[in-house]
Amino acid sequence: MITVKNLNKSFNGHRVLENISVVFETGKTNLIIGQSGSGKTVLLKSIVGLHDADSGEVWFEDTLFNKLPFLEKKVIRSEMGMLFQGSALFDSLTVEQNVQFPLDMFTNKTNEEKIERVNFCLKRVNILNSNQLFPSELSGGMKKRVAIARAIALNPKYLFCDEPNSGLDPLTAIVIDELIKELTMEYSMTTIINTHDMNSVMEIGEKIIFISKGLKCWEGDKNEILISDCGPLNDFVFANSLAKRLRSEYRK
């Protein structure tokens, strides 16, 4: 579980996050949604420590993470998995080397143990016989799977996903969503997904918070989102005529 309490963040005097409080639950897919520039990416980066909050608290279980010294933060970071927008694989490394990278950084495993873990993770995301390929030889969906394999290499307690479906076709995006949800349940992780993809929201949105202009305006699940009375949320969710018709049908 990750708990955020009264988090504030500004850049050059401009308030980007204002008094954000939320509990991200273990074993669930927790989604942060909002328009571009709403503050959702800053929130995600503040949670993992890539941004220092101006005030407020970020708790990982019973540990006040954002107040820890750098070296003590490293212990918590070794329990994190990161899935970046665009996959962020190292172009000069093979698939095997990419997945092994966090094992090299945070463990003292032997090379044989590392390769065994790499192969396990690649098999879990259904990437077979691709260890020696380079990212340039992979499709977009395969890159995402390799990135997920790298993210779970350390068997993390916490998984952070920044726009995991960016650049993917709709069918591949659904597969990636389902894989993230499966792994979240399988490993009982606290998974936080930053997205603006409404398909993801409706497929795997077990807990959702909506950020608008730096404020948390709404909190609920994928069923409650369709009947919300939050104006900014409705403008975001029902931005096209098809979505509006679906809302109307759902409310009948």
Image (cartoon, rainbow, N blue to C red):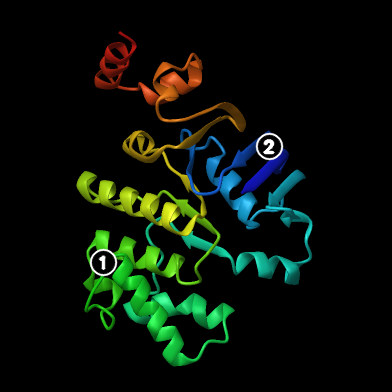
Residue 169 in the image: above or below residue 84? above
Q: Position of residue 162 (x, y in %)?
A: 46, 51
Q: Residues within 10 Å of mark 1 (few under 14, many from 20)?
A: some
In terms of secondary structure, where does tag 2 sit?
strand
Q: Quadrant of the C terminus?
A: top left
Residue appearing at x 32%, y 67% in the figure: 124
- The answer to which of 239 and 23 lies nearer the viewer is 23
- The answer to which of 92 and 127 lies nearer the viewer is 127
Specify the quadrant of the image occupied by residue 115. bottom left
Residue 203 in the image: above or below residue 184? above
Residue 76 in the image: above or below residue 174? below
**Mark 1: amino acid:** Asn
- The answer to which of 166 and 96 lies nearer the viewer is 96
In terms of secondary structure, where does tag 1 sit?
loop
Q: Which mark is residue 126?
A: 1
Residue appearing at x 50%, y 75% in the figure: 102
Residue bearing the label numbered 2: 14
Q: Is residue 51 left or right of residue 90?
A: right
**Mark 2: amino acid:** His
